[in-house]
Image (spheres, rainbow, N blue to C red):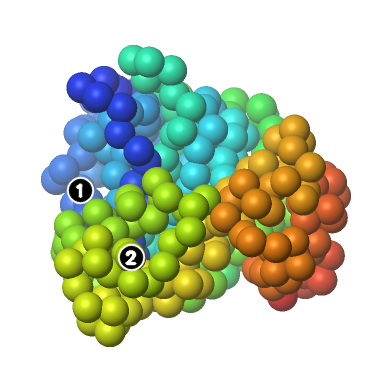
């Protein structure tokens, strides 16, 4: 079994917090428990863990390892670098070293879930050293370079979950062989989406609480009218100081960040299929349909109607495929 992180039940329901690329906590190897079995996790190239929800490990953080992350239960929002995406069971992403990330479940039952995600973590430096013995790994290294800032594998099946369990079940060279097969298949995955559009990898630790408070406020009131003046006042800052602070913290202006958060919520509602597109526009905080459509196409490369169809969602029109990765224009 994957190493299970025991979920914790919060004393009172708390709204999910939107994280900031500059407020992530560094997760050192010493903060992780050893993998079950005779071999310590730090001695292995590949480490397998299972995350519950809620959990102390469910936080905005980054680390030095690559992480292949598969959601197996609940729905929610994934914050990876400067990207915000909705997730559901089957959501599979590869996150590069020092890319800040957090997956927040929004429909976990009371008491949480024991296993929300399965994750495989591995060190690039160790894998690079292995290419001296196995030159065939060079292709995988090129793939990791392309996926450094995050990549989503669209259409992941139950087979991926079984294969991740097989990686964990083996040890030594057999584990490495299973992992290499999985990595090779992902390098040739037919439909992928690049996540973070900018270099958000962190090079130092830090956890300013003010930005977390601000982003939680934005998330809670995203569908309502949000002005720079009101949010800066909430933060106890002048508009000018707040604008500079917010852009340093998130990599976006206040207006652009709110727009992206609203479009992410619109994507979730479009996939859910219960609301008309015109209704979704107003439910997520836009004041007219033409403005909503314009921003949606700018950020997603398709219209809301095109996105709602499976074909449009899996491979957006206007996107380009390069070496197996979809980049939305």
The image shows residue 171, relative to residue 281, as above or below, that is above
Q: Is residue 88 left or right of residue 28?
A: right
- Residue 262 sits in quarter: bottom right
* SS under mark 1: helix
Q: Could you tell me which residue is drawn at 26 percent across and 56 percent down?
A: 212
Q: Is residue 260 visible?
A: yes
Q: Nearer the viewer, residue 78 or 165?
A: 78
Q: Could you tell me which residue is drawn at 57 percent across and 55 percent down?
A: 285
Task: Return the x and y of residue 258 as percentages of the image width and height.
Answer: 48, 63
Q: Alpha carbon of mark 1 to alpha carbon of mark 2: how far?
A: 41 Å
Q: Could you tell me which residue is drawn at 74 percent across and 38 percent down?
A: 275
The image shows residue 329, relative to residue 114, as above or below, that is below
The image shows residue 142, relative to residue 71, as above or below, that is below
Quarter of the picture holding the C terminus: bottom right
Q: Which residue is mark 2?
A: 230
How dense is the environment of label 2, judged by Cα within 10 Å: few (below 14), some, or many (20 and up)? few
Total marks placed: 2
Q: Is residue 76 left or right of residue 188?
A: left
Q: Could you tell me which residue is drawn at 54 percent across and 65 percent down?
A: 259
- Looking at the rendered image, the disc whose residue lies closer to the viewer, 1 or 2, is 2
Q: Is residue 120 left or right of residue 147?
A: left
Q: Residue furthest top?
A: 111
Counting residues from the start of the chain, the first of labels 1 and 2 encountered is 1
Task: Return the x and y of residue 183 as percentages of the image width and height.
Answer: 58, 49
How dense is the environment of label 1, judged by Cα within 10 Å: few (below 14), some, or many (20 and up)? few
* SS under mark 2: helix
Q: Is residue 158 left or right of residue 92?
A: right
Q: Which disc, if any, is residue 29?
A: 1
């Amino acid at each position: 079994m994957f190493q299970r992180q025991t979920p914790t039940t919060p004393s009172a329901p708390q709204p999910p917090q939107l994280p900031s690329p500059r407020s992530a906590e560094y997760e050192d190897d010493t903060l992780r428990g050893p993998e079950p079995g005779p071999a310590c996790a730090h001695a292995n190239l590949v480490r397998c863990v299972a995350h519950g929800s809620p959990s102390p490990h469910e936080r905005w953080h980054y680390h030095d390892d690559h992480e292949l992350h598969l959601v197996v239960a609940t729905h929610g929002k994934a914050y990876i670098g400067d990207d915000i995406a909705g997730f559901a069971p089957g959501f599979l992403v590869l996150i590069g070293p020092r890319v800040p990330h957090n997956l927040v479940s929004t429909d976990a039952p009371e008491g949480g879930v024991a296993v929300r995600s399965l994750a495989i973590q591995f060190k690039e430096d160790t894998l690079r050293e292995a290419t001296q013995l196995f030159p065939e790994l060079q292709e995988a290294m090129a793939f990791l370079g392309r996926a450094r800032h995050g990549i989503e594998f669209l259409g992941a099946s139950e087979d991926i979950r079984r294969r991740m369990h097989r990686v964990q079940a083996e040890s030594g060279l057999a584990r490495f062989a299973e992992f290499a097969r999985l990595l090779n298949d992902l390098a040739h995955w037919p439909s992928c989406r690049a996540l973070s559009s900018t270099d958000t990898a962190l090079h130092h630790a830090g956890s300013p609480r003010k930005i977390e408070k601000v982003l939680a406020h934005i998330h809670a009131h995203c569908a309502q009218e949000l002005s720079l003046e009101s949010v800066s006042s909430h933060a106890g800052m002048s508009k000018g100081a707040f604008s500079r602070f917010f852009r340093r913290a998130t990599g976006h202006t206040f207006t652009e960040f709110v727009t992206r958060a609203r479009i992410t919520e619109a994507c979730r509602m479009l996939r859910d299929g219960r609301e008309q597109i015109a209704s979704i526009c107003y439910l997520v905080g836009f004041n007219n349909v033409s403005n909503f459509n314009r921003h949606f196409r700018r950020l997603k490369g398709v219209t809301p109607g095109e996105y709602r169809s499976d074909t449009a969602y899996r491979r957006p029109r206007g996107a380009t495929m390069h070496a197996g990765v979809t980049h939305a224009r």
